[in-house]
Image: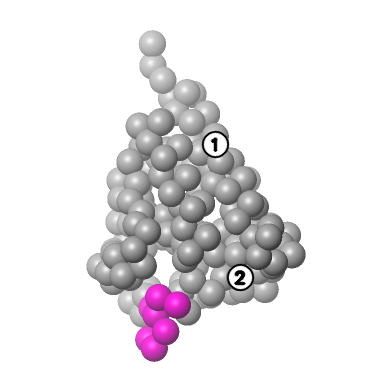
């Protein structure tokens, strides 16, 4: 149900970005590519400094999707400051994670999966969930086609 909710938000928000750190960024890139085939353009960047810059200039009109197996993405981005202090003007944030205990106050919705947290299996659940998000979005688009 959370994947369907995210697909609805992707359709609703004009400014959508997806990010991850290192291997997790592959899931964001996959999501970007797959959504593009459904004519939804989202932003992502392999360069971590560009991700940090983007997140430093977001507002409530942005939708942010974070792929982070251990839910440590924001600790890397905002190592010395607390992000999104202004809760009235923060973006809507989804985090896809294998961390069952993370509860960041600025993350609106978690999409959680079981993870062994090992190097060999780490990127695969994220990639599967990125594909499920794309499929949910594509099926929403098909339902909304007017003939």
Label 1: which secondary element: helix
> Does 92 appear in magenta?
no
State if disc 2 and disc 1 touch (CB < 8 Å). no
Q: Nearer the viewer, residue 3 or 31?
A: 31
Which mark sits nearer the N-terminus, 1 or 2?
2
Q: Nearer the viewer, residue 99 or 29?
A: 29
Give the total number of marks visible in the rendering: 2
Mark 2, other Cα within 10 Å: few <14 / some 14–19 / many ≥20: some
- The part of the chain drawn in magenta is 76-83
Where residue 73 appears, as percent x and y from the top left, is 49, 71
> Does 79 appear in magenta?
yes
Label 2: which secondary element: loop
* Number of the label disc, if any, that sits on residue 70: 2
Where residue 103 appears, as percent x and y from the top left, is 59, 74
Residue at the extreme top of the image, as rendered: 147
Magenta: main secondary structure? loop
- Which residue lies at the image location 29% right of the left edge and 65% below the top edge? 50
- Which residue lies at the image location 34% right of the left edge and 57% below the top edge? 45
Q: CA distance from mark 1 to mark 2?
A: 24 Å
Quadrant for the C terminus, please. Answer: top left
Where residue 58 appears, as percent x and y from the top left, is 29, 64
28 over 93 or under it: above or below: above
Locate residue 52: give its quadrant.
bottom left
In the displayed structure image, the side of residue 1 where residue 145 appears, left or right: left
Residue at the extreme bottom of the image, as rendered: 80
* Number of the label disc, if any, that sits on residue 136: 1
- Which residue lies at the image location 65% right of the left edge and 65% below the top edge? 119
Is residue 55 something one can see in this rendering? Answer: no
Q: Nearer the viewer, residue 124 or 78?
A: 124
- Which residue lies at the image location 41% right of the left edge and 44% below the top edge? 32
In the displayed structure image, the side of residue 145 where residue 70 appears, left or right: right
Is residue 12 something one can see in this rendering? Answer: yes
């Amino acid at each position: 149900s959370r994947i369907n909710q995210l697909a609805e938000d992707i359709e609703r928000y004009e400014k959508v970005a997806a990010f991850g750190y290192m291997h997790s960024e592959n899931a964001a890139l996959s999501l970007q590519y797959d959504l593009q085939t459904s004519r939804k353009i989202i932003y992502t960047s392999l360069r971590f400094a560009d991700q940090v810059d983007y997140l430093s200039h977001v507002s409530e009109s942005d939708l942010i999707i974070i792929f982070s197996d251990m839910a440590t993405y924001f600790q890397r981005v905002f190592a010395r400051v607390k992000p999104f202090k202004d809760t009235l003007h923060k973006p809507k944030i989804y985090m896809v994670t294998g961390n069952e205990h993370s509860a960041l106050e600025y993350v609106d919705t978690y999409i959680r999966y079981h993870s062994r947290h090992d190097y060999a299996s780490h990127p695969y659940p994220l990639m599967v969930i990125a594909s499920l998000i794309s499929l949910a979005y594509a099926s929403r688009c098909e339902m909304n086609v007017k003939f």
